[in-house]
Structures are given as C-alpha cells and as structure tokens.
Image (spheres, helix red, strand yellow):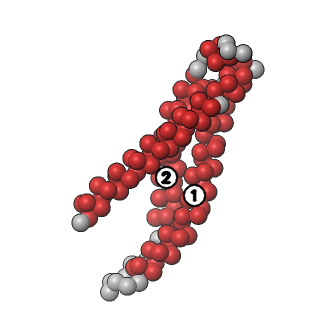
C-alpha cells in the first residue's frame, strides 16, 4: 500500500508540473510582444526571467500559505488517533513548501529562459 501511494504521489507531482509548464508556456506566449519591447528598450535576460517568474512565485507562495495550516491541522488530528504518537515538526512543513517552490521554479524556468532568449525582431515584425 505504501509503495502504491508513493507511485501515485509521484504521478500526481508530474501531472501538476505538466499543468504548471503549460500555464507558463501560455503566459510566455501571450506576453511575447511585451518581452520583445522590453528587450528593444534595453532589458537584459535576467530581468525578463525575474518578471515572468515573479507571477508564478506569488501563486505558489499563496498556495503554500493556504495549504500549510490546513495540512497541519489535518495531520495533527489524524495522528492523534494512533496509539503511538509523534510530534509534528515545523521544519517538515517549511521543507514541503520550499520543495514546492523549487519544483515550480524548475518547471517554469525553461519557458522563461526560452522567452527571454527570443529575437525581438521576429515578434515585432507583424507591427
């Protein structure tokens, strides 16, 4: 049962990363002209990567802020029903939040780097 749960957790993480990757690709494509104009006006690639990553970082931080207290209370009430009890450590929840943020950065990073490296002439030629 534990092995099956681990496999299903990995599959759930992969599916959520695919969704986040698709959302970042859509956002980068939608903002391609804005990125090109910023590059023409002198923005470097790091500032563009930071611009696109900030939106996803905010979303993940909001999700972690909402999920951590809820998961703490659910885990605490579930663990109280066992004969042998353990204490929940705060660093487990902070570690899970940081891991979620790291996974989001790695997932979004490829798309933001691609969007930052695009040639502005190709995007603005239609105008």
> Residue at (57%, 52%) from the top-left corner?
60
Left or right, 63 with respect to 121, comes to left
Residue 26: x and y in percent read 56, 35
For marks 1 and 2 on the same chain, the one whose residue lies earlier in the sequence: 1
Spatial CA span between label 1 and label 2: 10 Å
Q: Is residue 117 visible?
A: yes
| Residue 29 image offset from top left, x and y in percent | 59, 30
User: Horizontal placement of 108 versus 45: left or right?
Assistant: left
Mark 1 lies on residue: 63
Callout 1: 10 Å neighbours few (<14), some, many (20+)? few
Any part of residue 42 in sight: no
Q: Secondary structure at mark 1?
A: helix
Which residue is painted at 63% across and 50% down in the image?
A: 58
Q: Position of residue 117 (x, y in %)?
A: 57, 22
Residue 15: percent from left, percent from top = 40, 47
Q: Residue at x 56, y 32 (%)?
A: 112
Front-most of residues 94 and 39: 39
């Amino acid at each position: 049962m534990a092995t099956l749960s681990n496999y299903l957790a990995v599959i759930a993480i992969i599916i959520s990363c695919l969704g986040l990757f698709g959302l970042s690709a859509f956002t980068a494509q939608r903002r391609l002209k804005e990125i090109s104009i910023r590059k023409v006006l002198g923005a470097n690639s790091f500032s563009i990567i930071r611009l696109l990553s900030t939106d996803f970082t905010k979303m993940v931080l909001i999700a972690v802020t909402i999920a951590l207290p809820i998961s703490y209370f659910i885990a605490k009430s579930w663990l109280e029903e066992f004969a042998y009890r353990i204490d929940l450590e705060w660093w487990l929840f902070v570690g899970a939040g940081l891991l979620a943020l790291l996974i989001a950065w790695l997932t979004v990073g490829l798309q933001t780097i691609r969007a930052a490296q695009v040639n502005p002439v190709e995007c603005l030629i239609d105008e």
